[in-house]
């Protein structure tokens, strides 16, 4: 069952969408594509305070994981657009 039909059956107009901040753009776009009015409430933010130092621009494991997460979302957005889901 599509989300839009589930919400329409319950006379819901606005839906609070809670998901990881990384996934929010794709998730919100999917709901909006189905005609659902989404109020985004992102959580689990990966960004934090920026503290620059001499080693800030050296590759590290944390940066690698964040890049992998971002790349996966970019690919997901592209795939959803190609499949007509967005």
Image: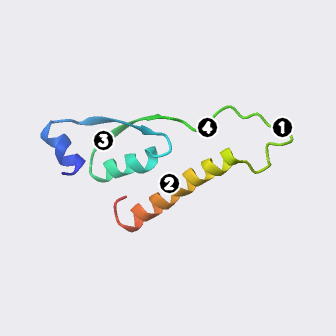
Q: Kindly report the distance in space between the C-alpha atoms of the residues bearing marks 2 and 4.
A: 15 Å
Give the x, y percent position of residue 18. 38, 35
Badge 1 is on which residue? 53
Mark 4, secondary structure of its residue: loop
Residue at 22% from the left image edge and 51% from the top image edge: 2
The numbered mark, 2 or 4, whose residue comes first in the sequence reads: 4
Secondary-structure class at tag 3: strand
For the residue labelled by badge 2, is the local secondary structure a helix, a strand or a loop? helix
Q: Earlier in the sequence, mark 3 or mark 1?
A: 3
Identify the residue shown where x is 37% and y is 58%: 86
Q: Which mark is residue 73?
A: 2
Whether pointer 3 and pointer 4 mark residues with C-beta atoms closer than 8 Å, the reply is no
* Badge 1: residue crowd in 10 Å (few <14, some 14–19, many ≥20): few
Disc 3: which residue? 37
The mark found on residue 47 in the picture is 4
Residue 63 placed where, x, y %?
Answer: 68, 47
Label 1 to label 4: alpha-carbon separation? 17 Å
């Amino acid at each position: 069952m599509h989300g839009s039909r589930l919400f329409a059956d319950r006379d819901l107009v606005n839906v609070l969408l809670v998901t990881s901040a990384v996934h929010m753009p794709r998730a919100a776009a999917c709901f909006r594509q189905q005609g659902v009015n989404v109020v985004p409430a992102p959580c689990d933010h990966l960004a934090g305070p920026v503290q620059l130092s001499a080693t800030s621009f050296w590759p590290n494991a944390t940066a690698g994981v964040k890049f992998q997460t971002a790349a996966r979302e970019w690919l997901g957005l592209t795939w959803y657009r190609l499949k007509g889901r967005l």
